[in-house]
């Protein structure tokens, strides 16, 4: 991570005054700028205003249902959005130390899937943009977006692709991410068994092409 000097909207200055902003570059491919603000906040800046609005809406909906960030402030100006949220405790499942025990990793992934898909989304107006269905999904269920602390799931991040949709969008990316990060498909059968599903080649290929 690298310290940065960032200009931010007036609405956020009271929260950021006197704090260090350090750019987060690991496991981050959206093109947005992401900063850690001391050990307190995460600040996202994006030219995709709608994506950050969706993330805020999903986090707001999930508060009290799952461990997600709490919205602190949001601002959009000159076709750029700023989203300030609380920082969650934990390391991502893609962290090297979490990859050293693949069986424990699979156990945590299974738990994370059941946690997310166990959310009652019957009153949720937000649809997953990339799939159709009635299951509450993350939409980008990859190892870097799942946090763990002291051996337990401690948070979910980057929720902007979530909402009601087909659970296979999460299964597909979960399988893909597990194999990518471990460099093997040896543990995929264990993951499928834990989730309680059979491999669907057609859906896997469809969703991982999106």
Image (cartoon, rainbow, N blue to C red):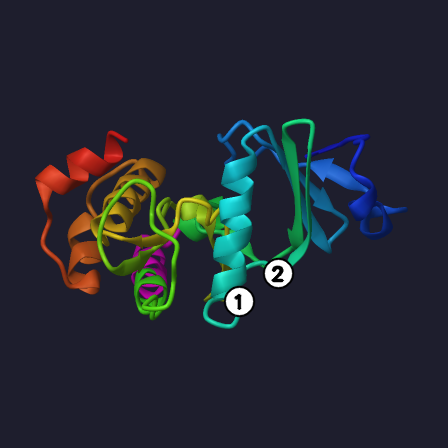
Q: Which residue is drawn at 52% across and 34% down?
A: 28
Give 96 or 148, whichever is nearer the viewer.
Answer: 148
Q: Residue at x 38, y 58 (%)?
A: 125
Q: Mark 1 points at which residue?
A: 63
- Please give the count of numbered marks on the rendered protein: 2
Please identify the quarter of the rendering in which residue 124 is found.
Answer: bottom left
Q: Outermost residue, right direction?
A: 18
Q: Name the residue under label 2.
A: 70
Q: Is residue 13 visible?
A: yes
Instruction: Give the overall secondary structure of the magenta segment.
Output: helix
Per the rendering, the mark at residue 183 is: none
Q: Are marks 2 and 1 in contact (CB under 8 Å)?
A: yes
Please tell me whether residue 79 is drawn above or below residue 43 in the rendered image. Answer: above
Q: In this view, does 38 lie to the left or right of 23?
A: right
Q: In this view, does 54 lie to the left or right of 32?
A: left
Residue 147's x, y, as percent?
49, 56
Residue 145's x, y, as percent?
45, 48
Q: What secondary structure is found at the residue carrying circle 1?
A: loop
Q: State which quarter of the image contains the N terminus.
A: top right
Give 82 or 24, whichever is nearer the viewer.
Answer: 82
Which residues, given as a range, are shown in magenta?
Answer: 100-112
Q: Is residue 13 left or right of residue 111?
A: right
Q: Is residue 86 left or right of residue 154?
A: right
Residue 55's x, y, as percent?
51, 48
Please tell me whether residue 82 is drawn above or below residue 156 in the rendered image. Answer: above
């Amino acid at each position: 991570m690298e310290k940065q000097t960032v200009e931010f909207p007036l609405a956020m200055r009271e929260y950021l005054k006197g704090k260090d902003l350090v750019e987060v570059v690991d496991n981050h491919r959206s093109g947005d700028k992401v900063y850690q603000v001391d050990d307190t906040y995460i600040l996202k800046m994006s030219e995709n205003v709608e994506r950050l609005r969706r993330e805020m809406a999903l986090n707001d909906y999930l508060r009290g249902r799952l461990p997600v960030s709490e919205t602190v402030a949001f601002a959009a100006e000159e076709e750029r959005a700023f989203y300030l949220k609380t920082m969650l405790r934990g390391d991502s499942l893609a962290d090297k130390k979490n990859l050293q025990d693949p069986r424990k990793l699979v156990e945590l992934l299974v738990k994370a899937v059941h946690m997310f898909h166990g959310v009652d989304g019957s009153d949720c107006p937000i649809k997953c943009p990339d799939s159709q269905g009635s299951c509450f999904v993350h939409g980008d269920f990859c190892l870097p977006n799942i946090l763990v602390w002291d051996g337990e799931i401690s948070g979910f991040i980057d929720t902007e692709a979530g909402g009601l949709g087909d659970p296979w969008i999460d299964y597909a990316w979960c399988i893909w991410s597990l194999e990518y990060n471990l460099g093997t498909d040896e543990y995929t059968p264990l993951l499928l068994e834990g989730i309680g599903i059979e491999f669907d080649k057609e859906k896997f290929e469809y969703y991982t092409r999106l």
